[in-house]
Amino acid sequence: MTSTSQEAPRTTTSHPRVVLAILCLTQLLLTLDDNVVNIALPTIQRELGFSGPSLVWVVNTYMLAFGGFLVLGGRLGDRYSLVRTFAAGTAVFALASLLSGLAAEPWQLIGARALQGLGAALVAPAVLGLLTLVFTEPAARAKAFAVWGATAVTGALAGLILSGVITEYWSWRWVFFINLPVAALALVLLPRLLRGVHRPHGDQALNWGGAALLTCGLALLVYALLSFGGDGGRPAVAAACAVLSLALLAAFAVDQRRSANPLVTKGVFASPVRARALVAAVLLSAATFQGFLVLTLYLQNGLGFTPLEAGLGYVPFALGSLTGVKAGERATVRFTAGRVLTVACAGTAAGALLLSWAASREFGYAGLLPGILLFAIGVGAGLPAAASAAARDADERTSGVIASLVNSSQQLGGAVGLALTGLSLGDSGHGFGAALAVCAAAALLACGWAAVVARREPLVSPSS
């Protein structure tokens, strides 16, 4: 074992395009399962006998487990190799998908969704970490991050359409069963294609105490945010969970300073570019998630679209986001990720303001299109740029945990966006214009943090 760990690691593969396709296809499953069950929830409620308050946990349990275990998943990847962690996480995710599709009782589906979130927390950091290690040349890495970003954005949109089609023409259970062939393909091919790309670092002992503090702290924070944004929630319970989560995260920070084996490797936050890029990612993800959710509600509750029509109404959003991804990829190579992120956040804010104005004036779907396109272009360029800036200078010992922090920032931003949506829609639930204005404010804050990233980022990106 010692001799193996001393061998020079191989960070290339003879099939980079195939690797990119498999990694992004797996990422697509994770983003699909963030929201693919939303449209199927009424059918699930009827067939399994969920109560109204418990139904929301079909979605929330996945987000809790995913967000809570992400950093631990990244650290396990650095410790035992990203390829092994990817394989283990994909196997857990596939098993949980099978159990979700076979669920006959509410508790079975909620438990399976928690297990699915745990599998996703192992897979997501491995996907981004492996992209960082396999694609080291600036142009190739920018393209890989762009494809990853496009997958994340279009996965969320595809979830709405796919869920509507599957629920209407087949069974809601196939929402979960469709994960199985993709997971099987990834498990068979990827370990072979990436053999030797990332070796385990056996000298990196795991700090299980710090892992428990961080996991519980993040899970409670996500729970508090979801509760603040939910209907009929208990504010006192949510506030208590928020306070407890902050106490646990503070204890984690103290543990990290004192520990000889910190969960987040020392020096990860030393880079001012990385720390600020992660903050910008939280705020941009909050704006993205909130804008996406409010627009979905407005199309159905404001304009009277059916669920399937609302899903199809996002086709311009998909086209705009793909345009943003491509433009952002080219601009990142020339102008650096921080500068692209700044412009993208400004575009997202402008798009949200246009959407707010159109919704307030009740212009109809045609009046929403300019805002949809501008918002989507900003998101498409911004999310990959934030990830690229945060992953700068990642190496074999830190790529997993840095990737987990990028994913955590997006999950935390999603929970913040959900909380902001619940608060800004008002008691009537129809304050769409005001909610979209709040979304624009979040994007403007992200723009401010991104500007700091741009000022501190070197003009010439390193080659690796």
Image (cartoon, helix red, strand yellow):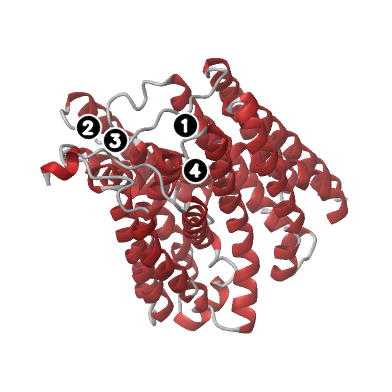
> What residue would you read off at disc 4?
410
Q: As drawn, which residue projects farthest toward the left? A: 2
* Circle on res. 390: 1
Count neighbours of disc 3 (C-alpha within 10 A) and say few if under 14, some if 14 to 19, many if 20 or more: some
What is the C-alpha distance between the residues marked 1 and 4? 12 Å
Say which amino acid is labelled 4. Gln
Count neighbours of disc 4 (C-alpha within 10 A) and say few if under 14, some if 14 to 19, many if 20 or more: many
What is the C-alpha distance between the residues marked 1 and 2? 19 Å
Which is more foreground, mark 1 or mark 4?
1
> What residue would you read off at disc 2?
262
The residue depicted at 39 percent of the width and 59 percent of the height is 190
Q: Earlier in the sequence, mark 4 or mark 3?
A: 3
- Mark 2: which secondary structure? loop
Q: Residue 409, image x and y in percent? A: 46, 39
373 and 352: which is toward the camera: 373
What is the C-alpha distance between the residues marked 4 and 3? 22 Å
Q: As drawn, which residue projects farthest toward the front? A: 14
The residue depicted at 75 percent of the width and 44 percent of the height is 433
Count of number-bearing discs:
4
> What residue would you read off at disc 3?
397
What is the C-alpha distance between the residues marked 4 and 2? 23 Å
